Image (cartoon, coloured by chain):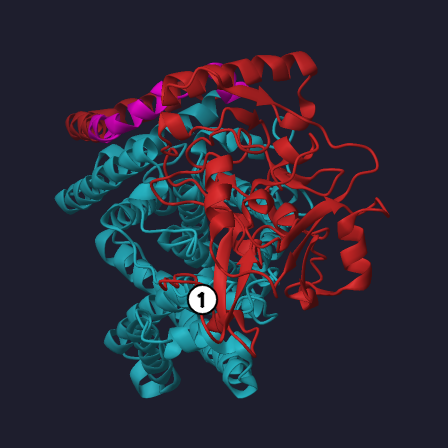
Chain colours: A red, B cyan
Amino acid sequence: MCEDKENKVDKAFESVTRRDFIKGVSGALASTAALGAAMTPALDMGKDLSWDEFYQQHYQELTVEQKEKIFKRIEQKVKTDYGVDNANVQDPLPQLGVEFAYALNLSKCIGCRGCEKACSKENNSDRASGMSNIRVLELDKGSINLEKSSQSYNPETVPQEGKYYMPIQCHQCQNAPCVKVCPVQATWQEKDGIVVVDYNWCIGCRYCEAACPYYARRFNFTTPEIPAEEINPDMGYLSNRPRPKGVVEKCTFCLHRTRNGKYPACLEACPTGSRKFGNILDPESEINYIIKNKRVFVLKEELNTQPRFYYFFD
Amino acid sequence: MKQYLTFCKRSISQIFVGSNLYFVWLTLLTIVMVIGAHAYAIQLRDGLAVTNMTDEVSWGVYIANFTFIVGMAAAAVMMVIPAYLYNNKALKEVVLLGELLAIASIIMCLLFVTADLGRPDRFWHMIPGIGRFNWPMSMLSWDVIVLNGYLLINAHICGYSFYCMYRGVKPNPWFYTPFIFLSIFWAVSIHTVTAFLYSGLGGRPFWNSAVIAPRFLASAFAAGPGFLILTLQIIRKVADFPVKQEALDSLRKIMTVAMVINLFLLGCEVFKEFYTDSAHVASAEYLFFGLHGANALVPWIWTAIALNVSATVILLVPYLAEKSNFLNLACVMAFIGIWIEKGMGLIIPGFIPTPIGQLYEYSPSMGEIQVCLGIWAAGFMIYTLMVKMVIPIYKGTVQLETTK
């Protein structure tokens, strides 16, 4: 359509501005080059990332063979990153007729923080930041106002007069706000009630951290630092394998242990027997007895999160 | 097709020519963008550890800016409604400049969200179809849809309108009017959904308030027109483009009403927090008065309130508001005041104290500030280039039939 006219217009247009135009274009090219040069530190990020990892599908869409390959790759990576060659990545599945629950006896807890440390060790958490999925709060007797609590208490001996202690970790809520808000379904509730994260699917938006009413989620701001001799080689894909940088993690009730019939590490570390764990569907279990017979309560019940983590007094 | 390509070629070539002032401006923006890009590259390499965000305050200045700029994008609707629904002629002449601002703003929003991601390499997990999109449960998945949708709608409206203007034909209403109405509805939705991101969280009482969405809209409809009043005057001056005084007056009136509503809603929130005086008042107390000696945000929020109140007073007194110096001052004050109120004043205190009562304060790191400035510069760059492309089309110097 009216091609001649257009050409004429083009020529007129270009003759007026050609010199300036070339100047402008070279300016734009120089700016683009400067932006490119400024971005060079980002090249180091690519070194750490394999194509297989980049294209990896969501955990729930992986076949058994794909999983095997991925676990091998992670074991290899643990070897190169941490210098440990006996890492064994497993994927124990939820068992039929099992729903886990936890109960914590506030009358017995003395606030020694043994659970906090055991958690960090068991779960290959970042040592540099002292990351643990458990925080122990010190509260004044006579009040349960968390805002008056202290997380950084540090006396010579515990328990202190007039104080009591409340460890907090993921409550594995049945109506979990963190699962609801995740934009990519990188976190979900398994059949046995444990809320897990696919560390290879999480995009690191930290919306779940904002949503959690119990401050139970942790973000890996850097690649976790763990000395080789402290690496726990018994790893679960959805639990304690070393996490990559930039993803969220949380307590998984040590599913790599508990789904294989063991207790969580925090329970085993507790010197007072305050911690009780088991299958709530088993009428013979201790946890079932506690919830039926003790005066149990959950934190922030008004939020209707329906935790699987109970507190009780003797 | 060929005609369309020529149109693209001609409009794009406009950005490479201009006055010295134009190139000085672009050079300045480029320098800031380069600094920002470098800071972001370091963040990519070393992780979000280079920011001052922590598990306690897990969103910082990126999300604060994101929230404010979603409002800037939504504010374009305050030109669209009078221009198309009430047939305000003066505004209709410049409405597309407002919609270009929406495009630039949305791109800035997407950049801010990307800057905040721990794993930007996995952004494809959010793409419906190839990723796993938690829609409709996650408000963030809604936000992805509405923001990108708004970008497309505005890109279509602007692209189609300017193409028609270039050819000297009237736009076909079938390709146009439905999208205008859609964009009105959609503009409200982007800021509502962004408010729901926060107000839907039961574990954060400071955000868990139904008034967040109305507040967001009111403050957006004040800051956005304020910014446009300033921008249109600059365009009028540097591009010698006729912006009618009536257009600025209409925007001023909209802004005045929005400022008053915004202050009222803020007052409602403050009353509810402090009169109730429940345990949930802690965040508001931290913001306005400081809590247990932690008071980093107190000077900011009172500055914001002082700026917003002064701006409102100027706008409400006709003698002052009709003087362009005072009006411009009010616009600058409102813009800064709302930026503080919505960013640092709403996002950060939501995290303080933590849900289990611990107090950790936050202020952005140098790297975070550089990335933010870089994204702002990128936004200004995009808007400048787009305006540079379309002004000659408006003026008729770039069109199908003749050159000058």
Note whether B75 is above or below B52 in the view shown.
Answer: below
Name the magenta segment's main secondary structure.
Answer: helix
Residue B399 position within the rendered picture, expressed as x and y whole percent measured from the top left: 38, 36
Residue B169 position within the rendered picture, expressed as x and y whole percent measured from the top left: 51, 40
Q: Is residue B5 left or right of residue B191?
A: left
In depth, the one of B165 and A137 nearer the eye is: A137
The residue tagged 1 is B353
In which image quadrant can residue A256 be found?
top right
Q: Amino acid at mark 1?
A: Pro
Q: State the residue lying farthest toward the right.
A: A283
Q: Is residue B193 left or right of residue B33?
A: right
Residue B328 visible (yes or no): yes
The question of residue A33 being in magenta is answered with yes
The question of residue B324 being in magenta is answered with no
Disc 1: host chain: B
Residue for point 51% across, 65% down:
B216
In which image quadrant can residue B98 be found?
bottom left
Q: Is residue A183 left or right of residue B59?
A: right
Residue B324 position within the rendered picture, expressed as x and y whole percent measured from the top left: 27, 74
Span colored in magenta? A32-56
Note whether A43 is above or below A268 in the view shown.
Answer: above
